[in-house]
Amino acid sequence: MFPEDFLWGAATAAYQIEGGARDGGRGTSIWDTFSHTPGKTFNGDTGDLACDHFHRFREDVKLMKSLGLHAYRFSISWPRIQPDGTGTVNAAGVDFYSELMDSLLEAEIVPVPTLYHWDLPQKLEDGGGWPNRETADRFADYADVVFRAFGDRVNQWITLNEPWCVAHLGYFSGEHAPGRKSLGDCLSAGHTLLLAHGKAVERFRTLVPNGTIGITDNVAAVHPASSSSEDFAAASRWDAYMNGWFLDPIFLGDYPDLLKSVFGDILPTITEADRKLITLPTDFLGINYYSRSIMADDPSGDGLKVRGVSQPDAPVTAMGWEIYPDGLREILEQLTARYAKPALYITENGAAFDEVADGDGVVNDIPRLEYLKAHFISAGEAIQNGVNLKGYFVWSLMDNFEWAFGYDRRFGIVHVDYGTQIRTPKASAKWYAEVIASGGQLKQRTNERP
């Protein structure tokens, strides 16, 4: 089902696991500010300590090796490299990531760093944040520092993680840092993020000529709520916004026509100079998939005039997200057809469940095991149908700070006791290790529910 050279890995993000918020010269990020603002996160939780990976990374690399991971996707904290987002480089931050990467390479685990996973330096937000086009230039300079520091030994890179979430959740809905609520800021942020991606790719081609680089976007299979023409049109609008907003400019050179129609002049124009940057060739596309979107027409709504609908009695995760594995195959095939069969990686897929550890920290998380197995099968079917899928990164390696949900939601295949910082592989981790060791063979286990 999976090719011999298929890359099996797990993923994390800097602010969610590192901790050490004030250690080693790290600056303040928008998530430090946001999480310390009363009412913004569950229980007032912050990433100040998180999983203390900053001090325990060697232990975590040993854990990855014990699971047989081929690769580890992680993010580099911009304020740990440049505390103010520009200018002076923090040598201690560079040393931390250098030691992490060397440890991974010694363990024969491929490092796959993401340059940006949501932790914009606060001083750049104070200067306008992502809606300010100059932030793309600052990002290019930061990328330049990182490529020069690590490009001699790390070959596979990701520019941005989920620019849709950065723009929509950060600048429109306000659910994520920096917590703004402006459609204009949201669309401007999206445009700057595309420019930042292009500028980083441009620097990469010069500094790491033999490496590979791509972007990670969150996507969903989009279905209409009914057979009505209105709901079909609503689903098309949401698909353009959810799946095409960033990928169409990168692969096709412009925003989807539907978005131009809906947003009009408030949607930035991609100039010819912008297009040359944004469409610079990349080597792969990373996708993060968790569920599908069921959309209904909502004439009374703003903007897209759509409304999300839940499927009655559908199984859901602790996030309330429908468990819909076939959507993964569907979106992989959709992207393959629309963008001329790019090389694809699943850079995140996983689930949070309400689970309780026993006295030894053991979690028999059969629902997560079943979730992953069903999605692996769906990915395998996509490969058989001609999708050029190269690897799969489970989200997440370990329980961590789940953004606005704080420590209330656990996505990890490894349990973390936040009081003691003890890591304990869950049943899903042990099963995943068997899958990797077998080359992707998905065996039924006797303790799995039918």
Image: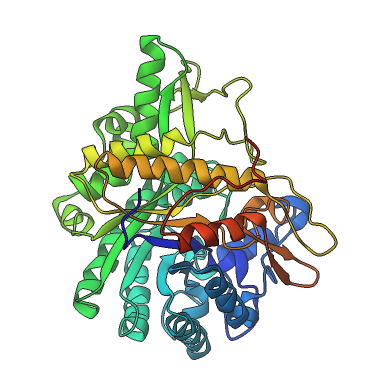
Q: Is residue 171 above or below residue 70?
A: above
Q: Is residue 195 above or below residue 321?
A: below
Point out the residue furthest to the right here. 359
Q: Is residue 370 above or below residue 147?
A: above
Q: Picture quarter containing residue 233?
A: top left
- Number of marks in the image? 0
Looking at the image, residue 369 sits to the left or right of residue 171; the answer is right
Residue drawn at 50 percent across, 40 percent down = 374
Residue 196 in view:
no
Residue drawn at 66 percent across, 66 percent down = 47
Q: Picture quarter containing residue 20?
A: bottom right
The C terminus, quarter of image:
top right
Q: Position of residue 22 (x, y in %)?
A: 65, 79
Looking at the image, residue 342 sits to the left or right of residue 378; the answer is left
Which of 130/349 is in front?
349
Residue drawn at 44 percent across, 42 percent down = 377
Q: Picture quarter containing residue 415?
A: bottom right
Q: Position of residue 257 (x, y in %)?
A: 24, 31
How is the rendered protein coloured?
A: rainbow
Which of 74/128 is in front?
74
Which of 148/441 is in front?
441
Q: Position of residue 241 (x, y in %)?
A: 37, 36
